[in-house]
Image (cartoon, helix red, strand yellow):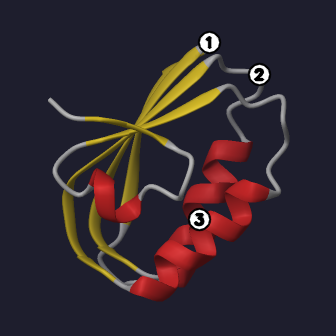
Amino acid sequence: MAQNFRIIRQGSGQSFRFSLVGDFDSLSAIELADALGNTGEAERVVVCTSCLGGIEPGGVLALGRRLATRDRSLGEVLFTGWRADILAPPGSTVFHV
């Protein structure tokens, strides 16, 4: 995992917000996918990408593979922020503010 990567988690129950901070690589993708998997049966998880630095292409691919096989009990994953278009796997919901 990139040394400076972290996930700031907010919310509980049916709604979560994950703010991603630092650089994103393949190990960061695994950490994010695991965090998404630990949201129980949340209806929505918003992933904010505005505080990301560098995004490695391998991280984007790893995240896409992990989310493609995720537990279907997880509701909508919404990517937002100025780096959302880069990070969001194909077929994901992207929201531009």
Horizontal side of residue 55 vs 9, given as left or right: left
Q: Of 72 and 42, which appears nearest the observer? A: 72
Type of amino acid at the residue the image marks with label 2: Glu
Q: Are marks 2 and 1 in contact (CB under 8 Å)?
A: yes
Q: State the CA–CA distance, disc 2 to disc 1.
A: 7 Å
Q: Which residue is mark 3?
A: 31
Residue at (85, 42) in percent of width and height: 71
Residue at (23, 58) in percent of width and height: 83
Disc 2 crowd rating (10 Å Cα; few below 14, some 14-19, many 20+) is: some
Q: Which residue is mark 2?
A: 41
Disc 3 crowd rating (10 Å Cα; few below 14, some 14-19, many 20+) is: some
Q: Of 79 and 31, which appears nearest the observer? A: 79
Residue 45 in the image: above or below residue 38: above
Type of amino acid at the residue the image marks with label 3: Glu
Residue 28's mark? none
Q: Which residue is mark 1?
A: 14
Element type at marker 1? loop
Q: State the CA–CA distance, disc 2 to disc 3.
A: 18 Å
Element type at marker 3? helix
